[in-house]
Image (spheres, rainbow, N blue to C red):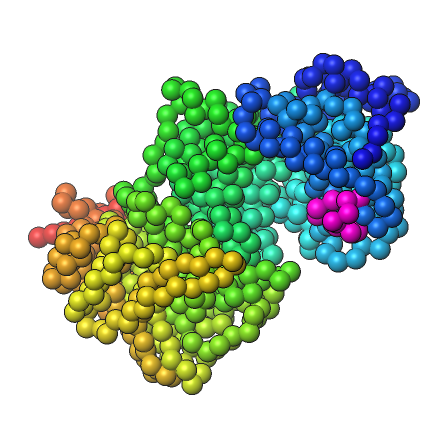
Amino acid sequence: MLRPSRRSLLRFGGVAAAGTVGALAPARAAYTPDTAFVLLRRRWREVTAGPPHDPRARPYRALGRAAARHLATMAPRSSSLWPDEPFPSSTVTPGRLRTMAHAYVIDGTGLTGDPALAAAVEQGVAHYRRHVYAAGADPVGNWWHWQIGIPRALLDAVVLTGADDPALAESADHFVPPRRLRHYTGTSTAANRVDLCLVTLLRAMLTDDHARAELAVSALAPVLVPVSEGDGFYRDGSFVQHTSVPYQGGYGVTLLSGLATLYAVLRGTPWELADGRVFDLVERSFAPFVRDGACMDLVRGRGISRRSWGDHERGREIAAAVLLLGESAPAAYRQRWQAMVKGWAVRGTYRPMLEHAAPALRARLAPIMSDAAVPAAPEPVGHRLLPMSARAVHRRPGWCAALSMASDRIGHYEHGNGENPRGWHTGSGLLYWWADGHGDHYSDGFWATVDPYRLPGTTVSTRRLPDGAGEAWGGTRTPWRWVGGATDGTYAAVGQHLSGLESTMEAFKSWFFLDDAVICLGAGITARDGVPVETILDNRRTTASLTAADGWAHLEGHGGYVIPGQQLRTLRESRSGGGVRRDYVTLWLDHGVDPRAASYQYTLLPGADLERTRAWAADPGRVRVLANTARLQAVHVPARRLTAACFWNAGTAGGLTASAPCAVLAQEHADGTATLTVADPRRDLAELAVTLAAPVTGLLRGPARYSGRTLTFERLGDLEGGSVTVTLRLDTG
């Protein structure tokens, strides 16, 4: 084990005696401290340590135990710092040093302010820097480790413990020179950009470098500017990284955490951040994809393959970032976010958030959970459609559904670095859904054991694919632009013109999201692969009882399926992977080998019991399918006086005529008014005319003009697939 030097003992002795973060004074004996940087370093330590907390809580003790193990087993050699981690050990070794530094500054670890621990961190960083991260070293492997991962961990450790290592500044300057932030392009965008700014700010703290601190802050500016292509945030709330991967639950939470940290650390310093656009990102881009504390997999990229409970881990990371950002936000935001996160924590019973929280999250969440003045916000109700990332989330009382599609902008899936090699069909219309009591359904070994050719909601060619089929890093886009739909915030008509991954299969798929059901239509299903094509109604990880009858099926405790006039195939199997075995019930439709214009129709009833499923199947008038072809898919819901349509071409359905491809929702109301919602999923219309069966006597609200029965919308293509709703008065006589 490394022993502290006399110089280190002198440096850290006062800290150990004080035993609090507030007493941690940066060691800068060789020069006159710059007061701005004294404050900056103190703020960094305060943010890392978190607010005052119960030091007896489990996460703090666990952190201390981990740090103690690292301290006891550290054994510097030319080829390693720990015997089990030969160099370069780009992730583990820097991570252990950072863990030790966190145990040094966080109260309750048993090692808070321990001079031996601080000295070991200092010597460990110096050892790793000499043998691996030296200025001029060859950056073998992934660029991210050398420019973000390694320097972030090492610099963080040095700043937290007050270590003195001028050579680390030289290494950071070599691998992350100021010119790295000069242009917003390549791997210096979105989340990567925030990380590079964090590294630059930490580097500035080593030598009180005002120019680098200013650069770190000014280089953040492009991150919050809405984009129309490539990496970043879009007007509809989409967040994309790697050009074509929706990523709120991966790079996005890294970005949000980084911004939250920077806003908190820089508060009160000369570099305080003032751009308030970051506060709108929480509810527009992140919250729609968190359900009961877990982050939905459709925005986690290749990360879905990493760990069984990764969705819950990412949910906790989003919660931690939201609460930290709330400390810099106006009071109204902070109050809403605390209630929102408390609601997630109260409903998230499968991996309780407080029980599994990292130290910083626990310190902020525990007081909120015990504060009766902070309400636990309920699960929201409504529909969120994000056309620029081909994602949709539908929430109704008692259930939730989410849809993942591929398009000319968004890849079928992401693989890279050996991760997620069989996520081939996650963009082929994968329909996730949760009823009450199913918050763990896509966790607990799901991705390691599920049949990757039979993902719920997808239509796929059963052609066998190699691991990592298609271009890596999300470069598996389709040629089709018609992917998206229209929503009024409650209901939605969503469609996908689908091409199979590395197959000849083509299909037109639509989903109509209603109060208690999702109507699923498919048409024009064609392939020439010499293998069967299937549509998967569901693939539930369960041992529940399945009841199947003519035209319907019911899965006990989950929900129902109505399948009129089609032969349903079912399979109950046990599957192994990742060291676990899980049971599945699969329901699918077989379109045969090389189908020509095949179709399907089924209704998903999340949470429905057996009687409601049987009653729905016995009443085909509940929802009338008006059309199901490769030109048009449409339904009518008489009880809601609602007509919804995906026009793949100009056409007419149920009293609606569209002049061009579009998505439409039309709903009549008892007071003689109607709402008409339209969208241009292809994003290229200069003008769209929609003609109604009943004459329009007035346009009450909305951007359109009318003449007789026809409403004309202009420049829908400029809305990037977004929906427009107008309110009309009809002549119902």
Whether residue 549 sits left or right of residue 75 in the image: it is: left
Does the magenta-highlighted stretch encompass residue 122?
Answer: no
Whether residue 368 sits left or right of residue 558 in the image: it is: right
In magenta, the rendered stretch is: 81-93
Q: Residue at x 75, y 35 (%)?
A: 72
Quadrant location of the N terminus in the rendered image: top right
Whether residue 150 sits left or right of residue 297 in the image: it is: right
User: In the image, residue 414 lies at what x, y percent?
Assistant: 55, 61
Q: Considering only vertical position in the picture, is 146 above or below 575?
A: above
Q: Residue at x 12, y 57 (%)?
A: 615
Q: Nearer the viewer, residue 502 or 634?
A: 502
Q: Residue at x 78, y 24 (%)?
A: 115
Q: Residue at x 28, y 44 (%)?
A: 398
Q: Considering only vertical position in the picture, is 76 above or below 462?
A: above
Does the magenta-highlighted stretch encompass residue 86?
Answer: yes
Q: Nearer the viewer, residue 273 or 591?
A: 591
Give the number of marks.
0
Q: Nearer the viewer, residue 374 or 14?
A: 14
Q: Considering only vertical position in the picture, is 71 above or below 143?
A: above
Q: Which of the 4 image quarters holds residue 585?
A: bottom left
User: In the image, residue 341 lies at what x, y percent?
Assistant: 44, 33
User: In the image, residue 599 lies at what x, y percent?
Assistant: 29, 74
Residue located farthest toward the right when viewing the structure as drawn: 30
- Say if residue 647 shows up in the picture: no
User: In the image, residue 567 lies at what x, y percent?
Assistant: 23, 74
Q: Nearer the viewer, residue 468 or 643?
A: 468
